[in-house]
Image (tube, coloured by chain):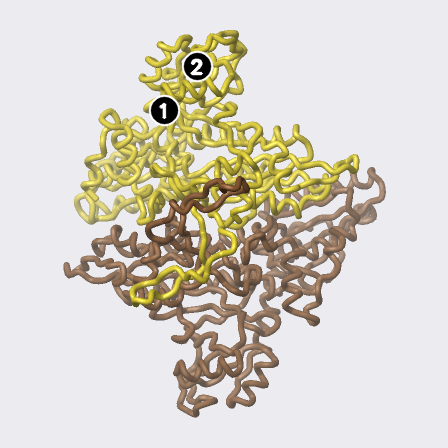
Chain colours: A brown, B yellow
Amino acid sequence: MAKELKDLTKRADNYSQWYNDLVVKADLAEQSAVRGCMVIKPYGYAIWEKMQQQLDRMFKETGVQNAYFPLLIPKSFLSREADHVEGFAKECAVVTHHRLKNSPDGKGVIVDPEAKLEEELIIRPTSETIIWNTYRNWIHSYRDLPLLINQWANVMRWEMRTRMFLRTAEFLWQEGHTAHATSEEAQAEAVTMLNVYADFAEKYMAVPVVKGVKTANERFAGAVETYTIEAMMQDGKALQSGTSHFLGQNFAKAFDVQFVNKENKPEYVWATSWGVSTRLMGALIMTHSDDNGLVLPPHLAPIQVVIVPIYKTNEQLEEINQAVAPIVEDLRKRGISVKYDNADNKRPGFKFADYELKGVPVRLAIGARDLANGTVEIMRRDTLEKSEGKLDGIVDHVAELLEDIQENIYRKALNHREEMTVKVDNYEDFKVALDKGGFILAHWDGTPETEERIKEETKATIRCIPLDAPEEEGVDMLTGKPSHRRVIFARNY
Amino acid sequence: MAKELKDLTKRADNYSQWYNDLVVKADLAEQSAVRGCMVIKPYGYAIWEKMQQQLDRMFKETGVQNAYFPLLIPKSFLSREADHVEGFAKECAVVTHHRLKNSPDGKGVIVDPEAKLEEELIIRPTSETIIWNTYRNWIHSYRDLPLLINQWANVMRWEMRTRMFLRTAEFLWQEGHTAHATSEEAQAEAVTMLNVYADFAEKYMAVPVVKGVKTANERFAGAVETYTIEAMMQDGKALQSGTSHFLGQNFAKAFDVQFVNKENKPEYVWATSWGVSTRLMGALIMTHSDDNGLVLPPHLAPIQVVIVPIYKTNEQLEEINQAVAPIVEDLRKRGISVKYDNADNKRPGFKFADYELKGVPVRLAIGARDLANGTVEIMRRDTLEKSEGKLDGIVDHVAELLEDIQENIYRKALNHREEMTVKVDNYEDFKVALDKGGFILAHWDGTPETEERIKEETKATIRCIPLDAPEEEGVDMLTGKPSHRRVIFARNY
């Protein structure tokens, strides 16, 4: 263990390596024996569970229900929707057989050639196709609408270059799939879920996000409109953190899902889909953490407070144990998760470093002298500041401190984003700004061709057209054609 | 909808068809477009979620943490443990390729022959192999033990004959995988989890279970000992509802997982695994439900109480709405989930039948005359008894009634099991008893051969050797060889 606490790469030395190191050393995840698939370790999974629980509550508050659809999708389903197949039916895991048998040479097992499937099955890269094929039987009348369904599931996309949490072949996510009687209602739903994602990112992850619309180039395969929340990482790169799609009637037409409307006429159903994934873990890590390890927002930290006793004798430890017990109980009553680490096989210094690495927001250290004085040493993980507090009233103090940390790391991330966001009006300045990193607000002529050319020349993409972008007349940096508002360019994960 | 309420097959006419009908008509699940895979619909999933939440709490109380391991397992992993491969590496979904491409004829997509995997990957039928391959890197010293990990996941077994919830190709489950320093500790863990399962089944599902040990024939592939909880369905057939396995050092040896013990000597790690699945939904349905539909135990019912207004005029409805609002609020404060169904597009009789079909434990009906009299009609789903209650104090009454229903359906199921459990001492009586259904307590000589012969001749298997089976000298029904306790024979799902 001890060695893991050391040799965490510094962000300034190699940001990318720092991230990879941190994911492993903080016990969040590790590579598995299967190419591009990770193992999410208990500590990482505990954070994901807290995310899930909160998101699930927020979805349900909007009337969404959970369900579960099959992992495997018949190959032919993928090609029903023309754009969708281009986007999703290429790099994916294909099931072709349903049996193994003993190898004739007696060594292990081989695929039984007689157990070939008539039609190959694809491990879902996303579930629009199988779900809309199901909705055909569920939706007959406008009275069956809206249908608001979400599933928590694993999905698989055979990515060539993978990075833990950010881009893995298999990942965990939720995918919402809703059906509506009108275009307006479906569009409103897509925006509602975008707002849920933004609220979750800002209030729970403490990650400020820009809400916007994707350009046609960056749209989900099969969507009419893709909404996105975009976050900025500490290195100035953008991370798309969640998307919500207005799908029009594309999937309803591809799977023939019609309903009888109030005027008693058949009509194709209007759709949305929306999802966030374990990628949020990447956003969380890269937004707040530092060279000492993770910094977790208190609202999502599996352990919010750790208490470490400092003692020399067993008598001292016993006294501290007794003084700490009611504090632990009171913290728990307040709904604060606390760990009292009085394990005697590790020194306090080791424990301090370990909990720093793990991003525990507040650390209390209590020694024999503290007990005598009625004091406690308080360390807040976000600033690493230590202070002396009074044991009396410590629970209230910790509760306030947790909220303060939550706000502080959000504000810090917001300041960072604002400092790293610049307006640029010509292509030379654009390239200079890009190399510094951050979001660049620039005019764009609205054509895919210009966007594509900029991407090829600079590796920058349009992250989104912000929903709140003010109208402003200008001209495209490259083509000089007119533009009515600035869009956000950035390099991205 | 209305037609779904009718034509639910009667249990006496065709128990098996009744089950299939009920699963579909109560909106629990339906067949999907993929062979043997079901769609779990929102109402069914809501019950499963309540099961998950409670089980998850119970696991965590014993110190278990959640994590997530890859969906795909390299083919070669399956053949590392000799028994395991026989049990699991046969009927399974095999991924052989990782890319599709456009068909040359322009119609749809085909598997790209150039994207063949070097080693095929299997969709996990269970995860011992990939998890123990991972544990090799996590376990070095006795200080790393015990390791108590669970995952909630989907798994796939290419079953030939499937039935919703009871046996599906893909199913949802949890699988616990623990690692220990001693054989005793691992065995104790396997029993601890068996007890968690039994407590959950009895206190939440209201399903009485027999705890026992499986015979060698029925053991999990790769286990030294398999513990089971066995429930009896209304038709007298047994349903294996959860299993917990002591794996000895089999997987540690297969994946070379050693630790340095306290004596500083290398030793193979001791293991357990344990799981319950969406099969529990089948047990829940078949234990309590009747010819009117589902009967759900209050502790797992997504809606515990439904309130239906009976009115003729809008004024009456408005009055009832006002009277019901504080009752709904008070029920929710008590943690009771309640639905007030004042939708005006369905008649009360339709609503009554629908909530009966869905198994809502308590129904309150309030009409204008009730309001005047301060009364309410109360219907309990388990007995279908109606009574008149007072609006004053209704919340307390409902809370008590829910507990009473929970106990009553448990007692009813227990009585049924006791009535359907018989002792038999010769093979002729055995066959007669079998055709009546139920558990048969009989002597067995302990050999796989005898068990196998009985199975072939009668389709009965030994469900378990009950943990609390009293010692009793006897002789095997078939062979006349000595036996020291009775075991449970039954036909099973």
Residue A446 tag number: none
Mark 2 surroundings within 10 Å by alpha-carbon count, few (fewer than 14), some (14 through 19), many (20 or more): many
Q: Report the amino acid beneath label 1.
A: Lys
Position of residue A285 in the picture relative to residue A61 (left or right) = right
**Between A28 and A196, which is closer to the camera in this rendering?**
A28
How far apart marks 1 and 2 lie (CA) works out to: 14 Å
Which part of the image, by quadrant, shows the C terminus of chain B? top left
Quadrant where the image shows the N terminus of chain B: top left
Residue name at image x 53 percent, y 39 percent: A106
- Residue depicted at 60% across the width and 38% down the height: B251
Where does residue A165 sit, x and y in percent of width and height? 55, 59
Query: Which class describes the residues within 10 Å of circle 1: few (<14), some (14-19), or many (20+)?
Result: many
- In the image, taking residue B394 as reference, residue B125 lies left or right, namely right
- At horizontal 45% and vertical 19% (from top left) the residue drawn is B451
x, y percent for residue B332: 41, 43
N-terminal of the pair, mark 1 or mark 2, is 1
SS label for mark 2: strand
Give the labeled residue for mark 1. B237
What amino acid type should be assigned to the residue bearing mark 2? Leu
Circle 1 SS class: loop
Q: Specify whether disc 1 shares its chain with disc 2.
A: yes
Marked residue chain, label 2? B
Tell me: residue B99, above or below residue B287. Answer: below
Residue at (69%, 59%) from the top-left corner? A380
Residue B441: numbered disc: 2
Inspect this view and state whether residue B365 appears. yes
Q: Is residue A347 left or right of residue A398?
A: right
Q: Is A398 drawn above or below residue B124 in the view shown? A: below
The percent coordinates of residue A334 (x first, y second) are: 59, 47
